[in-house]
Amino acid sequence: MTDISIETPNGSIDAVLETPPGKGPWPGVVVIHDAFGLREPHRAIARQIADNGYLAIAPNLFARGGVVRCMRAVMSDLMAFEGRAFEDVTAARQLLSKRSDCTGAIGVAGFCMGGGFALIASTKGFDASVPFHPPPLQSKYSEIVDGACPIVASFGQRDPLNRGSGQRLAEVLTEKHIPHDVKTYPHAGHSFADRAPLHALARITGFGENKEAAADAWQRVFTFFGQHLQ
């Protein structure tokens, strides 16, 4: 694990970079954290991605102040589909693309809030998009994915924010002839893949980790990467 800085149009932000074992070049993946910030689960996810043969970079979208202020600003950008946070994501992608050990094929993966960024970024220069349990954007799917790269998405059926989202996204992607793999896990809820700090409420609200669903989702992701990120 290497802590690095990314130069963006709005100054530098910190990030985590994980490099695969062996000799490259490798495809790359930008990893986008959830609304609780860049935490240990995302560092572990970046390492997991690297261990499977992909350069992984996780930018800290909350690098410019306190969590609450940053969360508001970043969520505002997410709802606008543009802004400084998307510029940060683009800067992370560009950093990977300029590295001699990167093939130039780059995907984006995100969780909860980051899943929304990954979904919207599917039209912003990436070669594959991996949204895990994104925010409830169902009514805007048709707009969001118009011209998107291939998408592999994972939802939890117990997620109160995303009832019917997986089916709706699959329908839209099919209508637009976008390669995709969308799956809803019957016993999983929101944040099933990145351990949001809501364990006390998990049983009531449908939040919380589901290791079995996460393992299956990652197997689908790496199969999808093998098809679309080479």
Image: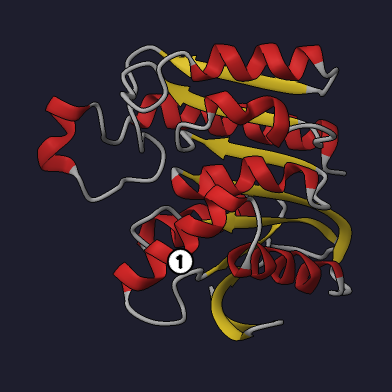
Q: Nearer the viewer, residue 50 or 109?
A: 109
Q: Is residue 164 above or below residue 152?
A: above
Residue 156 appears left or right of 229: left
Q: Nearer the viewer, residue 227 or 197?
A: 197
> Could you say which quadrant of the image residue 18 lies in?
bottom right
Res. 158 visible in picture: yes
Q: Residue at x 79, y 12 (%)?
A: 175
- Within 10 Å of the Cα at label 1, are there few (<14), some (14-19), or many (20+) other Cα atoms? some
**Residue farthest to the bottom, as pictured:** 11
Q: Residue at x 65, y 15 (%)?
A: 170
Q: Is residue 88 above or below residue 107?
A: below
> Could you say which quadrant of the image residue 147 lies in?
top right
Residue 126 appears left or right of 43: right
Q: Residue at x 59, y 14 (%)?
A: 168
- Please provide percent x and percent y for residue 83: 63, 64
Q: Amino acid at mark 1?
A: Ala
SS assignment at label 1: helix
Residue 149 appears left or right of 55: right
Q: Is residue 13 above or below residue 198?
A: below
Query: Badge 1 is on which residue?
Result: 73
- Please provide percent x and percent y for residue 174: 77, 13
